[in-house]
Image: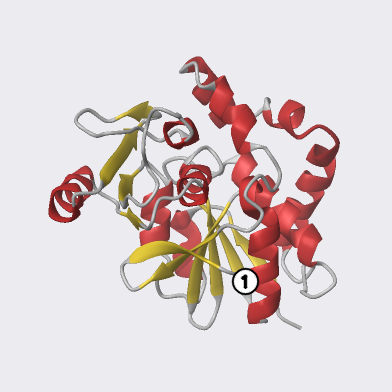
């Protein structure tokens, strides 16, 4: 039986062997949620990069949209910040466009996880797609929580617990204390996910930036249930599951 494990922070990735595994990159607030939304709303593919310089260079090279954020705020000189609503604005044409994106935590976590056999992006918005992909692969899964500047984030870990619950019949979700802890957190949070996560430091940080609308949107379960961003060569594309 394959195993599901949770990496609470990219700082802990050196403790894990990613070879042969599925890496699920999660940054609920907000990079993974934004990427899922972008592809769900018709963006053709996404270049997730660690640095602002590379993000801008890709925009020029490919003529694509650029999105960037640092410390929760939109970075100066880019088309968009790191809000899913940038791709829901009826006045903005995104369908068929490529996107280059760089964020404080999520895109860096993804770039650090490319040794895995398969790399996908997970959020509450596409939980069902992530679970279906993991089952179809039948490989060990490592949920890589982006956290906040190397530190633990409650919302990313709770997502890991939600995925563990979805996969509990097909995966070993009790062979790791990290997964067991995440599962227990999800079971506490599940009856009132928003209310539970309002305790989170990162949620309070985001809401202090007047981004509570983003918080509420990012907790919608399976709003994009058939959207699975998967790393292919040098980009994320939406694949069928």
Location of residue 71 in the rendering, given as x and y in whole percent from the top left corner: 37, 30
Compare residues 99 and 168 and report the one nearer the observer.
99
Give the labeled residue for mark 1.
141
Q: Is residue 33 above or below residue 241?
A: above
In the image, taking residue 111 as reference, residue 145 lies left or right, namely right
Residue 139 in which image quadrant: bottom right
Location of residue 33 in the rendering, given as x and y in whole percent from the top left corner: 53, 44
- Picture residue at 42% right of the left edge, 67% below the top: 231
Q: Quadrant of the C terminus?
A: bottom right
- Picture residue at 51% right of the left edge, 25% below the top: 206
In the image, taking residue 15 as reference, residue 72 lies left or right, namely left
Whether residue 132 can be seen here: yes
- Picture residue at 57% right of the left edge, 57% below the top: 227
In the image, taking residue 214 as reference, residue 184 lies left or right, namely right
Location of residue 30 in the rendering, given as x and y in whole percent from the top left corner: 49, 39
Whether residue 178 can be seen here: no
Location of residue 222 in the rendering, given as x and y in whole percent from the top left corner: 69, 48
Q: Secondary structure at mark 1?
A: strand
- Picture residue at 62% right of the left edge, 49% below the top: 224
Q: Quadrant of the N terminus?
A: bottom right
């Amino acid at each position: 039986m394959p195993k599901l494990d949770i990496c609470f922070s990219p700082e802990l990735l050196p403790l894990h062997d990613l070879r042969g595994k599925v890496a699920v990159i999660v940054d609920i607030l907000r990079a993974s949620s934004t990427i899922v939304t972008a592809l769900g709303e018709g963006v053709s593919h996404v270049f997730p990069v660690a640095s602002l310089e590379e993000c801008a260079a890709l925009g020029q090279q490919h003529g694509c949209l650029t999105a960037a954020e640092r410390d929760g705020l939109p970075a100066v000189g880019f088309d968009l910040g790191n809000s899913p609503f940038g791709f829901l604005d009826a006045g903005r044409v995104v369908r068929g466009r490529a996107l280059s994106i760089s964020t404080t935590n999520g895109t860096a976590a993804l770039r650090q996880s490319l040794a895995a056999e398969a790399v996908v992006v997970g959020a509450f918005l596409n939980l069902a797609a992530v679970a279906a992909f993991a089952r179809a692969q039948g490989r060990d899964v490592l949920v890589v929580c982006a956290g906040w500047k190397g530190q633990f984030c409650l919302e990313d870990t709770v997502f890991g617990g939600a995925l563990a619950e979805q996969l509990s019949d097909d995966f070993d979700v009790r062979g790791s204390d990290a997964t067991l802890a995440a599962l227990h957190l999800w079971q506490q949070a599940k009856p009132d996910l928003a209310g539970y996560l309002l305790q989170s430091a990162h949620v309070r940080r985001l809401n202090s930036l007047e981004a509570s609308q983003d918080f509420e949107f990012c907790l919608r379960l399976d709003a994009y249930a058939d959207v699975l961003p998967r790393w292919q060569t040098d980009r994320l594309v939406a694949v069928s599951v």
